[in-house]
Image (cartoon, rainbow, N blue to C red):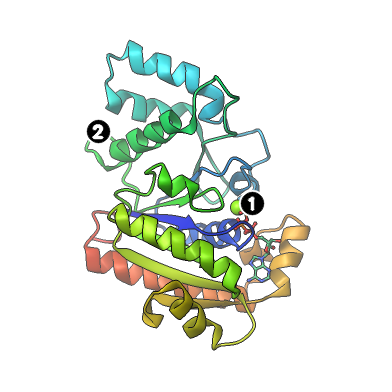
Amino acid sequence: MLKVIATGKGGVGKTTTISTLATMFSREGEKVLVFDTDPSMNLAMTLGLPYLEVPTITGNKKEINHELDEMDEDAMEVGRSILENYSRLNSDGIRVVVMGAIPEEGNGCLCSAISIVKILLNYLESDECPERYGLVIVDSQAGPEILGRGLAKDFDFNMILTEPTPKSAEVSKQVAGLARNLGVENNLLVVNKSEYPEDVARMASLIGLPPEDAVRVRYDHSVIDADRNSQCLLDAYPGCDAVADIKIIKNRLQKAAERFQCASSQYI
Ligand SMILES: Nc1ncnc2c1ncn2[C@@H]1O[C@H](COP(=O)(O)OP(=O)(O)OP(=O)(O)O)[C@@H](O)[C@H]1O
Ligand SMILES: [Mg+2]
């Protein structure tokens, strides 16, 4: 199972890129689970699941914690329960899990919700899970904070999204450093909304990554139009520049998965 976390400054294109990638993989027959850990919860909606139709983990944390106690801390049972009770499938068969809004003060912090994420990931990789997922992508909250809480540990890829600006590079640099400290060795820098090919080398150098770890997604009005009309980019503009560039990201991840010999249906 290839585990990818998408990180970066607010508005750089994390959710757009993840939803398009997930849809591409799913339509090629891969079993995909996406996890929205961003409190603004846009990913499910981008994948065609109406807001509030997916139960959130923070919204059900009391029940989940109760289950954890009841089950005598049998983490596998809790993982199974989260998958069965707190996730939804979209029309492409992508399984969507949503962390939910940050709980009010005094109602616990995100850390226990993050441990629930980890329980789910362990369950997905265990023999107890009847379904074999080939790809898990986590859409993270904007900025480096979520990495500071240790969520990225054990992920195969840190997909760092950046706009071609020094401000965006600054956040990406922090994110790359934090992920490295957590042991995530592979970075894929996605220079999004790029108008010039030279953006790739410039941003890679600013962030301190080798240029061969960076790819470019062109600035594309089709993305904004699809967003404005709540359309799936891949269906509305299958031949657009952004889709062509995101296909390159997909191929990079696929090749990496083969290299890692990830235990998955297609990637063994
Ligand atoms: N390649 C692109 N060309 C033009 N516009 C783009 C491109 N990628 C994303 N956008 C636009 O940028 C905006 C932000 O995109 P998106 O919501 O995917 O970013 P995000 O990183 O998930 O943001 P947040 O941090 O708020 O969750 C959207 O309006 C989207 O349509
Ligand atoms: Mg987002």
Crowd around label 2: few <14 · some 14–19 · many ≥20 (10 Å): few
Q: Position of residue 111 (x, y in %)?
A: 43, 32
Q: Position of residue 230 (x, y in %)?
A: 73, 54
Q: Say which quadrant the C terminus sits in.
A: bottom left
* Residue 46, numbered label: 1
Q: Earlier in the sequence, mark 2 or mark 1?
A: 1
* Nearer to me, 37 or 126: 37
Q: Hey, which quadrant is residue 70 in on the image?
A: top left
Q: Hey, which quadrant is residue 163 in on the image?
A: bottom right
- Left or right relative to 83: residue 195: right
Q: Amino acid at mark 2?
A: Glu
Crowd around label 1: few <14 · some 14–19 · many ≥20 (10 Å): many
* Nearer to me, 193 or 143: 143
Q: Amino acid at mark 1?
A: Thr
The answer to whether residue 211 is above or below residue 80 is: below
Q: Could you tell me which secondary element the residue under label 2 belongs to?
A: loop
* Residue 128, numbered label: 2
Q: Could you tell me which secondary element the residue under label 1 belongs to?
A: helix
- Left or right relative to 2: residue 65: right
- Left or right relative to 73: residue 224: right
